[in-house]
Amino acid sequence: MIPQFPVVAMVFAAMSLSACTLEMPQVLQSHPQTPAQPQQKPQPVMPDAIAASAAKAGTCYAYVQTEADGSATLFTGVGAGSVPPVGQVRTDLSPARADAAYAKELEIMKINPECLSTYTVPRQHA
């Protein structure tokens, strides 16, 4: 005689699975909803004229752009020939923080051996 254990086990497994499935909607309904994500501002873009100058290979650049809301964006990096140049973009800076970060980048450019030339545009001239 062949034991009926596998058949009985499968029946119980199917019953428990269906019980879990029936309980699942209640679990999901009691879970708090995640808050809506705030809309993100579009990423600032460096103007083409500045990007072309900063993109030259070996050119270290620092450019401060004033945004419409009064905040500032700082673009920094070392040009490698690609337009727009690859680098860092720091957004939502206050004017004072943008000026301080710009001054720090200028100091770094003076000692960076990768900087064969520099291209800088401070906040007041942007």
Image: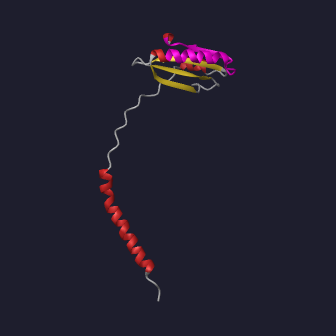
Identify which residue is drawn at 65% across, 15% down: 110
Identify which residue is drawn at 41% across, 17% down: 70
Q: What colour scheme governs how the chains and residues are painted in the rendered image of this protein?
A: secondary structure
Taking the view exactly as shown, the residue that stands out farthest to the bottom is 1
Q: Is residue 99 left or right of residue 107?
A: left
Residue 8 image offset from top left, x and y in percent: 40, 78
Q: Is residue 56 above or below residue 34?
A: above
Q: Is residue 112 magenta?
A: yes
Q: Is residue 48 magenta?
A: no
Q: Is residue 21 left or right of residue 119?
A: left
Q: Quadrant of residue 10?
A: bottom left
Q: Is residue 30 above or below residue 63?
A: below
Q: Is residue 77 left or right of residue 15?
A: right
Identify which residue is drawn at 63% across, 17% down: 109
User: Closest to the observer: 49 or 45?
Assistant: 45
Residue 11 image offset from top left, x and y in percent: 38, 74
Identify which residue is drawn at 48% across, 18% down: 97
Q: Is residue 8 above or below residue 49?
A: below
Q: Quadrant of residue 92?
A: top left
For the record, the magenta segment spans 98-123
Q: What number of labels is visible?
A: 0
Residue 87 image offset from top left, x and y in percent: 58, 26
